[in-house]
Amino acid sequence: MNVTSEIKYIGVNDYSKDLFEGLYKVPEGMAYNSYAIIDEKIAIMDTVDVLFTNQWLNNIEKVLGERKPDYLIVQHMEPDHSASVMGFFNRYPDTTLVASFKAFEMMVNYFGTEFEDRRLVIGDGDKLSLGRHKLIFTSAFMIHWPEVMMTYDSTDKVLFSADAFGRFGAIEAKVNWIDEARRYYFGIVGKYGTQVKKLLEKVAQWDIQIICPLHGIVLSENLQYFFSLYNTWASYDPEDEGVLIAFTSVYGNTEKAAMMLKDMLISRGYTKVALRNLIRGDISEAVADAFRYSQLVLATTTYNADIFPPMREFINSLIERNFSNRRVALIENGSWVPVASKKMREKFEKSKNLEFIESPVKILSVLSTESTQQLEKLADELSRKN
């Protein structure tokens, strides 16, 4: 695939993993992206997972023919992007390795060497000329590792964005970009919103026409939309006015209440209502929805005088990613002393700018006339913000 006439895609698709990073379901595979900039000198942008070293090296050879790379630029040291460094140097031993100082420190952990005999240390604002192509490097500290650099090709106006602007799924996967990019962002990068906003301010100085991420597809149209979306996500602002109802249920009664609340909201004209079963469903999708919508309803049972475990895991995932700027409602179920609402609210004590809706719903084992009326009042309150 040609990114431009002189920038070639040389990455690979991984269909062997069912879980990315051991956490995130990837039924449509995963892309490990790498690029070759072909000029008077040749730069290879990042490597791939070690399982695909030979395929990647063959891709390089097909693109370069008899020519050899002059530079290998490693923007990110996570193994899905750096694990083939040694395999690369076995085939191309005369190449110069370009990376940040922190990346070279990390290479000792992975490869037992800092490559002192063939390295070029680059920092924020440094430049590298390949001939016609002029590369500018910028630090992307904690997006989402400390050593990360991004690279701007000022000639073809291409931003090599490391893990930013990526998505789950192989290159050719028929997935909804925004859904898989949102799930990817809040799973992988979401904790570091402050750093993302700083990066967006830095790269705004450049005329960027193409974004080449390390995962997912190359972006070349409507880039302001993607930058605006990242700014919204990094600010922890809602993307849509809507409600996520996230629930756990032991015997089906809390699930019944969650489904009833959804129907009540729809009957009141609320068009964007998502329902997520935290026991059966993918928690990463529920996390993404929690950050997508303006309101969150948590419905769960009291379990061992605490919160039912999958709900506790879900709340922890939100807190770790700086969940804020939302309205939150709580529904609890219990047979004798329900305390789930109290425990859930306590977990959010340090979260910023959360408004808890004071329309309590307490279910004593099964829905009653009283608890159904409480659901109606909650639906009224949630709809008031629609």
Image (cartoon, rainbow, N blue to C red):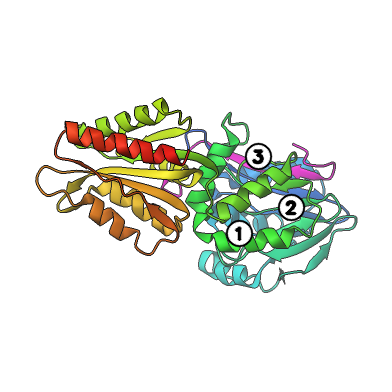
- Give, as a three-letter code, the residue at label 2: Leu
Residue 337 higher or lower than 150, as above or below:
above
**Residue nearest the observer in this picture, 198 or 343:** 343
Q: Residue at x 26, y 33 (%)?
A: 257
- Give, as a three-letter code, the residue at label 1: Val
Question: Left or right: 263 with respect to 322?
Answer: left
Give the class, few, some or many, for how many residues have Cα within 10 Å of label 3's Cα (few <14, many ≥20): many
Give the class, few, some or many, for how many residues have Cα within 10 Å of label 1's Cα (few <14, many ≥20): many
Horizontal and vertical percent for residue 352?
Answer: 44, 61
**Residue nearest the observer in this picture, 153 or 62:** 153
Q: Residue at x 45, y 31 (%)?
A: 270
- Residue under numbered circle 1: 196
In space, the residues marked 2 and 1 are separated at their CA atoms by: 15 Å
Horizontal and vertical percent for residue 140?
Answer: 64, 63
Q: Which residues are magenta?
A: 1-24
Which image quadrant for residue 119? bottom right
Horizontal and vertical percent for residue 125?
Answer: 76, 69
Residue 190 higher or lower than 28, as above or below:
below
Q: Quadrant of the N terminus?
A: top right
**Could you tell which of marks 2 and 1 lies nearer the N-terminus?**
2
- Residue under numbered circle 3: 217
Identify the main secondary structure in magenta: loop
Which image quadrant for residue 169? top right
- Give, as a three-letter code, the residue at label 3: Ile
**Could you tell which of marks 3 and 1 lies nearer the N-terminus?**
1
**Could you tell which of marks 2 and 3 lies nearer the N-terminus?**
2
Q: Residue at x 78, y 62 (%)?
A: 136
- Residue under numbered circle 2: 159
Question: Left or right: 336 with respect to 347?
Answer: left
Does 17 lie within the magenta span? yes
Horizontal and vertical percent for residue 221?
Answer: 75, 38
Q: Is residue 186 visible?
A: yes
